[in-house]
Image (cartoon, helix red, strand yellow):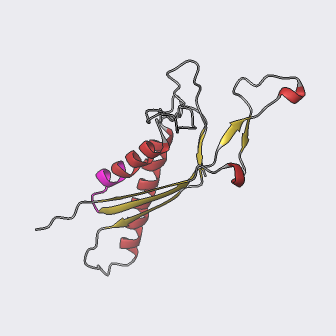
Amino acid sequence: QLMKPTQSGFAGFIVDQYTDIKPVDPSVAASPDRILCTNATINWTYATRPLRLEGAAEDKEYKRKNEEILTLMLEKFAGPAETGVYSKSVQETVYQMGVDAMQVHPDVDAVFFRLPNVHHYVYNLDKFGMKNPNVVFQKAGIPNNASGLIELRLTRKVSKL
């Protein structure tokens, strides 16, 4: 599970009479951060190449690359521990995670993300006679979590030559 409790918004989309979600943009004082949370599944594949029979050495190289890619993706998702990095949306963030993985490792041929939204809403403390200034949140259950599933597949462009 990946969670980003600050430095996360959801803005810049078309708002019209059919829009029922409010933009969340921390650059606007009245619009606080939102919690970005997902149970992510991320897969990547390597370009097809001739099989080398070096066994353990080949295994270690793939393990090293996989660890590098995972670390890169987590760093891109969260940003530096001291400051974080702002995310306009989960879509923008995971797109950049995939692009970075493919740039750093040219032998990565495709990256697939499956990200169900796990929403957290400000908990109403009125019944306890308390105000909640955007501090206490409650995870939404599946029936209340209808805004869904985000999937993204990035692949390298295949030459027609």
The magenta stretch spans residue 70 = no
Q: Is residue 23 above or below residue 50?
A: above
114 left or right of 145 in image:
left
Looking at the image, which residue is at 34% across and 50% down?
Answer: 99
Q: Would you say 57 lies left or right of 49 here?
A: right
* Residue segment shown in magenta: 100-107
Q: In which quarter of the image is the C terminus?
A: bottom left
The spot of residue 57 in percent (x, y) is 37, 72
Taking the spot 32% from the left edge, 54% from the top edge, the residue there is 102
- Answer left or right for 99 relative to 5: left
> Which residue in the rendered view is the most extreme toward the left?
161
Question: Outermost residue toward the top?
Answer: 29
Give percent across and percent down for residue 50: 25, 78
**Chief SS of the magenta region:** helix
Depth check: give the residue in front, 32 or 56: 32
Q: Quadrant of residue 65?
A: bottom left
Q: Is residue 45 above or below residue 21?
A: below
